[in-house]
Image (spheres, coloured by chain):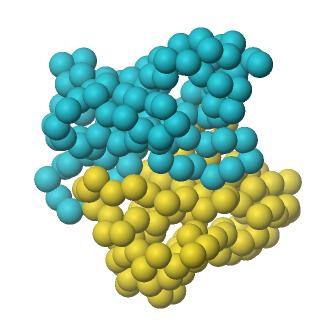
Chain colours: A cyan, B yellow
């Protein structure tokens, strides 16, 4: 079965520290890649997505992610985190099985706590 | 636009009771989804509806049924609730679904506790 792995369950950083959250997927074919964020008490919303072109994708709130096909990775980065970035981050992959329906497969999530 | 709305926000059930979670979207999306979110498990797809009139099983469909009432509404029913179904349930929608580059839009969630 296809899977998405997020290596860090909980990351704790101080404000202004740099962030990198890992995401690896297990499918070797064509994929679309997403990062969603869930702020405390809120529903999931899209941070950024990649499907083709420049492997470095920029999203909202200063986040970016790099797709490295050879490593099956799509890591999320931010140069300087803020307290307001405290949230849970989910990597998700949409896989093309050659049919019409390819559902999103989510990782287990990484909780980010930013200390003021 | 309200986006994706869900009712109720919170529910407590006793084992064996039944209930229906309601979801509606006002974005004219074709595809709708039900996920459950458990600590340390991320989101898992329960059922989806690629278009009005169709529904299909996702990763964890056992114990659930769904109805795509019309293009706007997609309900999730627990016929006989079990403690293992204690979770947060999210409804989502997307314009056309399928293998795509589309963003899914999520509702605020329903927190369900089964005693």
Screen quadrant of the C terminus of chain A: top right
Residue farthest bottom in this picture: B70
Q: Residue at x 47, y 40 (%)?
A: A60
Q: Residue at x 31, y 25 (%)?
A: A66
Q: In this picture, is A53 found above or below A14?
A: below
Q: Measured along the vertical axis of the image, is residue B16 above or below residue A63?
A: below
Q: Could you say where residue B87 lies in the image, as x and y percent from the top left?
A: 70, 50
Q: Nearer the viewer, residue A74 or A5?
A: A74
Foreground of the two, B12 or B109: B109
Residue A93 shows in this picture: no
Q: Quadrant of the image for the N terminus of chain A?
A: top left
Residue A58 falls left or right of residue B88: left
Question: On the picture, is A72 further left or further right than B85?
Answer: left
Please give the name of the residue rendered at 71% of the width and 67% of the height, measured from the top-left corner: B80
Visible residue check, residue A78: yes
- In the image, A14 versus B33, the foreground residue is A14
| In the rendered image, the vertical position of residue B27 relative to residue B100, given as above or below | below
Q: Nearer the viewer, residue B64 or A86?
A: A86
């Amino acid at each position: 079965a296809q899977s998405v792995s997020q290596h860090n369950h909980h990351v704790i950083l101080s404000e202004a520290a740099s962030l990198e959250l890992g995401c690896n997927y297990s499918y070797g074919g064509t994929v679309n890649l997403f990062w969603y964020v869930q702020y405390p008490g809120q529903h999931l919303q899209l941070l950024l997505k990649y499907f083709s072109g420049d492997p470095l994708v920029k999203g909202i709130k200063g986040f970016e992610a790099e797709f490295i096909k050879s490593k099956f990775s799509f890591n999320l980065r931010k140069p300087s985190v803020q307290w307001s970035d405290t949230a849970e981050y989910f990597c998700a992959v949409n896989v093309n099985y050659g049919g019409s329906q390819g559902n999103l497969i989510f990782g287990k999530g990484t909780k980010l706590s930013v200390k003021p | 636009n309200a986006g994706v709305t869900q009712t109720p926000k919170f529910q407590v059930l006793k084992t064996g009771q039944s209930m229906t979670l309601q979801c509606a979207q006002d974005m004219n999306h074709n595809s709708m989804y039900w996920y459950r979110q458990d600590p340390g498990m991320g989101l898992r797809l329960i059922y989806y509806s690629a278009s009005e009139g169709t529904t299909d099983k996702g990763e964890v469909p056992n114990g659930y049924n769904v109805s795509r009432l019309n293009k706007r509404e997609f309900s999730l029913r627990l016929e006989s609730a079990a403690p293992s179904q204690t979770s947060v349930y999210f409804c989502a929608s997307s314009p056309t679904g399928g293998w795509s580059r589309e963003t899914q839009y999520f509702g605020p969630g329903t927190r369900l506790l089964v005693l």
